[in-house]
Image (cartoon, helix red, strand yellow):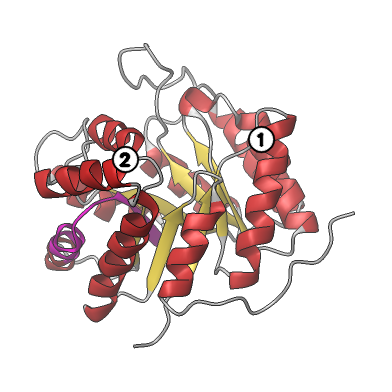
Amino acid sequence: MATPNISFEFFPPKNLEASFRLWDTVHTLAPLQPRFVSVTYGAGGTTRELTREAVSALHGSAGLKVAAHLTCVNATREETMAIADEFHAAGVRELVALRGDPPKGSGGFQPHPGGFNDSCELIAALKERGDFTIRVGAYPERHPDAADDNADVEWLKRKFDAGADEAITQFFFSADTFLRFRDRCAAAGIDKPIIPGIFPIENWAGARRFAESCGTSVPEKLNTTFETAERDGRTELLAIAFATDLCSKLMDEGVQDLHFYTLNRPELTRDICHALGVTPKVELRDVA
């Protein structure tokens, strides 16, 4: 079996300790030569400036192809496009265009006055603005805001029609979840790349809460297995075995690209990649 193409998601640091953690993550994972790495926004655009700083640092110093997240939340069209222009001027040509999560406690997404109404409007504006590679979100399981079970496929098609180049999915715990979604997308006429998102499970309680908040189903057998592993002190071994098996099943069905949500904790992601045959190829150059 050929080794997969990989990519990683990082989040911007909020303090000095988190900055060191981000750079440790970069130094650990960059030798695996990812296709790209992405840097997130916080809910409600709360880390907008930190994201810009992290993108600039990674792009300028780490020798990585960096995809910056850009959302519709809490900004006018002009403010959002000004950020895109700054990325473009800095040489960043990869973006992840998202509607974005509303601020906590806000009761749901509301477009900013003068802002983009949804991700499709943002994608179309970015496509007209510059030579960006635009990636978008996709949801193999029903998004909490989706009107019905077909809405996620319909929205993804709209995103591609607006100019998106690739999609990255929300994480899932069963290969069949992604494969069924891929089939539904193909039946709807979608023929652009859809990259499965993989979430290495470092803490099961946290992963389960995260899954519940974003509509990812949790198989009861998986829940029981991780609870047992925690009692026996075998969580890390189980996490590596589970993620490796999930990725292998996807690759057996023709998946060539995998996107890992690292949470800036690199060791587990690194070990899973090693188990899939992805080994270091280069050393990250020193950062001055």
Identify the residue at horizontal 32%, vertical 61% (top origin). Answer: 243
Q: Earlier in the sequence, mark 1 or mark 2?
A: 1
Identify the residue at horizontal 23%, vertical 32% (top origin). Answer: 212
Asked if the magenta segment contains residue 78, the reply would be: no
Give the farthest residue toward the front.
Answer: 232
Foreground pick, 40 / 85: 40
Foreground pick, 31 / 41: 31
Image location (x, y in percent) of residue 192: 33, 68
Foreground pick, 105 / 163: 105
Give the secondary structure at mark 2.
helix
Give the farthest residue toward the right.
Answer: 288
Left or right relative to 57: residue 8: left
Q: Is residue 30 visible?
A: yes
Left or right relative to 145: residue 238: right
Amino acid identity at mark 2? Trp
Image location (x, y in percent) of residue 40: 53, 41
Q: In which quadrant of the rendered image does the C terminus lie?
A: bottom right
Amino acid identity at mark 1? Ala
How far apart are the two marked residues, 1 and 2, measured between alpha carbons?
22 Å
Label 2 sits on residue? 204
Which image quarter: residue 186?
bottom left
Identify the residue at horizontal 84%, vertical 56% (top origin). Answer: 287
Foreground pick, 221 / 100: 221
Q: In which quadrant of the rendered image does the N terminus lie?
A: bottom left
Identify the residue at horizontal 70%, vertical 33% (top origin). Answer: 17
Rendered position, 183 above or below 87: below
Region in magenta = 166-182
Label 1 sits on residue? 18
Image location (x, y in percent) of residue 20: 72, 41
Left or right relative to 112: residue 228: left
